[in-house]
Amino acid sequence: MDSTLLTWITFIPLIGMAVIMCLPARALGTVKLVSLVATFIPLVLATVAYVGFDKTTEQMQFVANVPWISGLGVNYHVGVDGLSLPLVWLTTLLLFIGIPASFGIAKAGRAYYALLLLLEVGIVGVFVSLDYFLFYVYWEIMLLPMYFLIGIWGGPRREYAAIKFFLYTLAGSVLMLVALVALRLSSGTFSIQEMIELAQAGSLTGANLPFGGALLGMKFTTWVFWFLFVAFAIKVPVFPFHTWLPDAHVQAPTPISVILAGILLKLGGYGMLRACFPIVPDAFRTFAYVLGVLGVISIIYGAFVALGQTDFKRMVAYSSVSHMGYVLLGFAALTEWGMSGAALQMFNHGTSSAALFLIVGVIYDRAHHRDLNGFGGLSQPMPIYWGLTTVAFFAALGLPGMAGFVSEALTLVGAYDSADPRFRILVLLSVLGIVITAGFLLWAMQRVFLGTLNEKYKDLSDINLREILCLAPLLFLCVALGIFPHFLLDWMEPSVRHLVGLLGGGAG
Amino acid sequence: MANAYLSGLAAIAPELVLTGTALAALVFDLVTKGRDSRRVGYLALGGLALTSLLLIGQWGEPPRTVLGMVTVDQFGNFFKLFTCASLAAVVVFVLNDRRERRHGIGEYYFLLLGAAVGVFFMVSTNNLLLLMLGLELLSLASYSLAGFHKGDRKSAEAAMKYVVFGGLSAGIMLYGISLLYGLTGTIDLAEMASADGSGHPAGLAGQLAQNPIPVAVAVVLILAGFAYKVSLVPFHFWTPDVYEGAPTPVTTFLAVGSKAAGFGALLRFVGALFVREDVQDTVRAYGERVGLLIAILAAVTMTVGNLSALRQRSLKRMLAFSSIAHAGYVMIGVAAMSAGGFEAAMYYLAAYYFMNLGAFGFLLYFEGVTSSDDIDGLKGLGWRAPLVSIAMVVFLVSLTGLPPTVGFYGKYLLFQEGVAANLIWLVVIAGLNSVISLFYYFRVVRTLFLSKPAEREVAPQPLFVGLLAALGVATVFFALYTAPLVDWARRSMDLLWASSG
């Protein structure tokens, strides 16, 4: 069971997809049921993995390694450590929530659920891959269902948003592919772990390539680092590569926004930790400060732009840019606290932003618009909805006691402790982001829920049971992980310590 | 002597069967007075199947040269088998295309099979004269095929352009060959490259030292001839017009079978002249400079092809430009000037067969439904004909080079060999080109699926749909299980290196 567990988690949705494709188009009820089952089993299995995980080691667990393309030395090599397992679990959870959340979409049929399941295969696959080729294949598989999900079921400008998302990500992927080819030729292996070992030994420098692997006068490690970083930064998204995100988010249907914000953005951060920084650690150390600056720009810029939005969903989308900035800052600081905080922030943003998008979806389904200035006094017709929104907003703005507070605080303390004193300035600047975040969230709450009731909406029905059930696990995690963060941190700690050691950072 | 002659004939049995089938198709049509054209099609399919069986029967045999000029080896058989398979697909296309059935159909099959005979000789010889003959046989058949719709102005224009450009480039190539012959004293590529320059024939090594400029002129002229055949920029001007004007099954043959065969001959030419193990060192060094020239051609070709495809409204023209871009990608493998590069190019060509046959098949299917090749006409068709359209999405994903498809794996191999040959800049350009290509390939996907479902009902064509679905499955299957194609390409290469005389 141990070695096949991750494979089951990855491929059960694919089996579900195959079943759905064989069902007649009219049997929509059966299609929904199959989708629920095909996402619930991976969630259970991921929980089994979470419970059975050995927290004392940074070694990969539940490993399976069999040859795939022997001519090229590609293996089907999967495994999880403390960095990937929480994200795998989050993926299975959000996809499971995504199915009932889609019941409200009128157009959603067989093809919709099939694509959603295919998406899960790609995402989980990226998180469990330990072979760079496999990693890349999953990374690209994910794009196609996402393109269709935004492009067919999205809002009025869906075609533009879908192709923009695709082009941006593909541009990054192509850079990754070129770097991957160079790494393969330099290291002679596709195994990410072996590449890291070679990098530790100082022999992954492209010296065996023509001209030492240099490109346009850049050292091998330098250009490989930037190619990989940009590929992942587009996904995060880091300023200035973020412009696809608001379009994709606003046009995507609610469940897709949830998955996009909840998991797809984490792929970028996870990719940096797994497949970029430790492979070219010297280049990472050289440019760590630049990354920190980019992170802070994302924090402040994202928050300011969110402040200026009148579209509810656009505001939440930009808040993601801001929140993911902390992740980059935490990575760049190269301290254990910073790294733990960033890893935790990825998970917490996954729950809180997913909850925010669900909340936007609830009001959009009823009022059919998202203009923040077009509501008012909704706390009267929709008291339960208001209460849940308050929890989500406070989680997102990092109120003490909520999950977001722990991760942001850890990140900032970690960054302050960085061996590079210039990071202290960055921390001071990023505090500005916290204030503005609180500002735009509270202002949005005031405009939507407080004040005089807009007469048009006095008969709005309150949030229904299906929507509450979708939101509940996310909000529960937002609160629970604020009080008991060690339920994640303990799992992550050995891996984080190992990673910081690989990158040559201090304890902090 | 007689024995050698007979065993030589046995070795070229596939070619003989193919020629026989071509003639039989012509006669059969005359006898039945074109009344039942489908039977001629089945005859052609039967002949192709027999030819393929004979080719498979030659599996594992050591390479040998028979009748003084025909080299029978795995490398040639790789392209011959794919030619047979693509031609069979084209025949199925013709059988399913109502518009094609109106025209004198017997000659149609005769010309297609005749073109295939040309391909067979062209990819299996080190002898420049036979190479030229095969090329001309292929070209002559192609000219007539391009103009097959006699009443159609576009078709006539296509044929005319094709003849003029083709004649010119054949002349140029022949001039290059005559120069090379005059310089080296031999018409055989292997002899040319391996002679050390002291004796007679003088060989390329000796002439490189004494007459570098005439050698350069000869090589460039011959490459120009090939560049025309595989439509590399700047020798591509005929391609879009001919592809657009010719009947769609013919376009399929030109873009897939004929172009890949051109690459087969080019690989053998470059391989035998510059890369083989027994090549003189000075010649090998010269080959690397030729490689740089090819790399530049490749970069320009893929960029021009992709940028031009961006603006096309006709699916047929778009696929024409896309095939130019793909020729550019394949050239990365040629430019690498290494066994690995050639292997990658061969794998990519195999991938090219699958995805382009599929894409052109879809084009034909769609022309049958909407009677136009305008992309806008596809609106919402995906919901009406889901199986064919999903197959088309697979082909387009593969053409873009995304996993898990053969197009991706082929591109990966090409990139790897490019980087290994110190062509990182070319690989980066190719990567950016993939991003550009996504935009126009996915315009088709968008029109198919992202628009409202069409009102039009689509008549089912089980055989045709089955073929496209099978190609779609193959496009994914051979990317997940790459061993057969990769091994095949590698084995063909090994034999090419070892074969001498």
Image: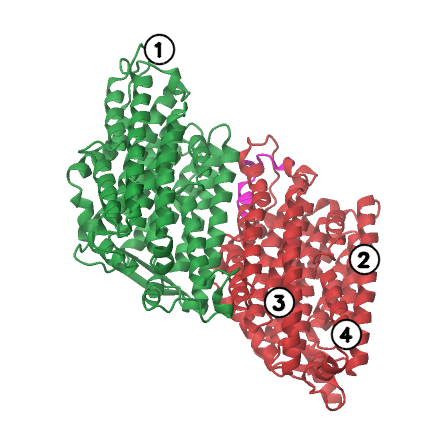
Chain colours: A green, B red
**Quadrant of the rendering where the N terminus of chain B is positioned:** bottom right
> Is any atom of residue A236 visible in this view?
yes
Chain letter for mark 4: B
- Binning the other alpha carbons within 10 Å of mark 3 as few (below 14), some (14 to 19) or many (20 upward) gives many
Under mark 4, the amino acid is Ile
- Binning the other alpha carbons within 10 Å of mark 1 as few (below 14), some (14 to 19) or many (20 upward) gives some
**Mark 3 → mark 2, Cα distance in angstroms:** 24 Å
What kind of element bears circle 3?
helix
The lab-note entry on whether marks 4 and 1 share a chain reads no
Which of the numbered marks, if any, corresponds to residue B165? 2
Residue occupied by mark 1: A454
Under mark 3, the amino acid is Val
User: What is the span of residues highlighted in magenta in the rendered image?
Assistant: B377-391
Residue occupied by mark 3: B334
What kind of element bears circle 2?
helix
Residue A356 horizontal/vertical position (percent): 31, 30
B60 up-or-down from B105: above or below: below
Which of the numbered marks, if any, corresponds to residue B213? 4
Q: Which of marks 3 and 2 is nearer the N terminus?
A: 2
Residue A452 horizontal/vertical position (percent): 31, 9
